[in-house]
Image (cartoon, coloured by chain):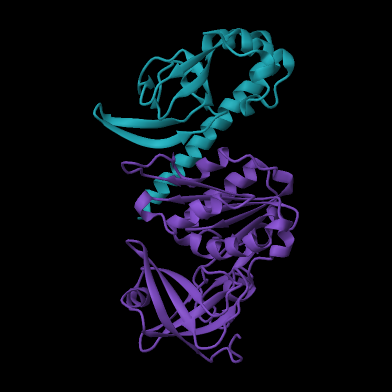
Amino acid sequence: MATESIYKVLKASIEEVIDESPLIKTFVLIPESPFKFKTGEFIELTLNGFGEAPFTPSSSPLITDKLEVTIMKTGYVTEKFHQLKPGELLGIRGPFGRGYPVENFFGKEVLILGGGCGLAPIRSLLFALEDIRDKLKRVVLCYGSKTPTDCIYKPLFSRLNKIDKFETYRSVDKPEPGWNETVGVVTTLLDKVNMKIENTIAVVCGPPIMMKFGTIRLLEMGYKDDQIYLSMEKNMSCGVGKCGHCMMGEFFVCKDGPVFTYGEVKNTPDLWK
Amino acid sequence: MTGLEFGELKNISFFNDYSDDHLKIISKISTIKEFKVKEILFEQYDQVSDLYILLEGTLSIGISLAKEKRIHLSSVQPGQLISWSAIFEPQISTAWVMATGPTKVLAIDAKKIQMEFKRDCEFGFLTMLKIAKTISNRLSDTRFNLMNQLTV
């Protein structure tokens, strides 16, 4: 169960640490009591004595006794997280924010465009979509990373390709020997998938540059503003819309998002900053 | 090798909006070419005389800093156009293109298609729109890639 007070921390022990890429690790956490969240919602992860930071779980929202969080080393707190070993304790607050409204995806094709560490929240969404795949027409994942080494969740792609209605495609900016998939930015993959645009929901999650160029390409292809869902996980701090750190135009990303339709936020100044 | 019948051209995504008359023109002025793995379709700065539409296989577009140093920029998917330089003076390719698997392309004679543009302006306008869209997407992808590199 989620903690009752927004300030109350739920203890969780680290069961396993998985190296995803040189800068990214996945932490498998065992909360001391069941923890529920909806896909796309985020948590505040606390490391005693060092601080806390917001992350969207990368595990299935259907599993409550185990939680996976994928963390990219970007600064002081995330570097401390990366030093943690199995058996050590963390704190969880949340879940917070507004996740993916998967009920809006029923009867549709779902195109997911992900880049870099943006695959973390997408992986949770993929687990959720796998559970409701009878209600979906098709799920297509297009994922881009800088190099094959930077590609995270490598086993995920072959697993999804074996599931009915699921297809995955990968691209890298810079190939390495042995790479025989697509080369180029992730938008290159959009020429490969033949979606029925009028009946498709597009989901975009990744670094701001990727989200900008990905969204622009989708709009050029004929997607409408409200067919595009963006996961705007930036500058979040308190998690409850009080500190103002994540303010984006009229929205607090942590409270009103982090998932928005492009239609909701398209007039926001510095949307892709 | 001869080209494709106009009925077969209908199945190629690049020609989605073309009328049967337009496809009959394409059929008359095009041939099919096949390439083996790692075969170069054309080098950067080569004079090019055909527009290519990828039918089967995969292609890689890249640039060279030196002859032995090839940098792969992007993959080409079936249905996509390459060698747009063949339409514009001085018909010099801006990149090299290599087959990364057994590949089949439709080669459209650029001089002949330009003569058809003069005869049938609607056909010319439609084709030039598609070429412009291809160039626009490549430019956008290049900017995306550049921004990626600059923000590392």
Residue lying furthest right in this view?
Answer: A107
Q: Nearer the viewer, residue A263 or A136?
A: A136
Left/right placement of residue B63 relative to residue B81 reads left
- Residue pictured at 46% horizontal, 17% vertical: B34
Left/right placement of residue A207 relative to residue B25 reads left
Give the x, y percent position of residue A35.
57, 82
The hue used for chain B is cyan
Q: Is residue B65 visible?
A: yes
> Quadrant of the rendered structure where residue B113 is?
top right
- Residue pictured at 73% horizontal, 16% vertical: B20
The hue used for chain A is purple
Left/right placement of residue A210 relative to residue A15 reads right
Q: Nearer the viewer, residue B53 or A250?
A: B53
- Residue pictured at 34% horizontal, 31% vertical: B63
Q: Is residue B77 above or below residue A233?
A: above
Give the x, y percent position of residue A184.
44, 41
- Residue pictured at 46% horizontal, 12% vertical: B49
Q: Nearer the viewer, residue A176 or A48?
A: A176
Give the x, y percent position of residue A272.
52, 58
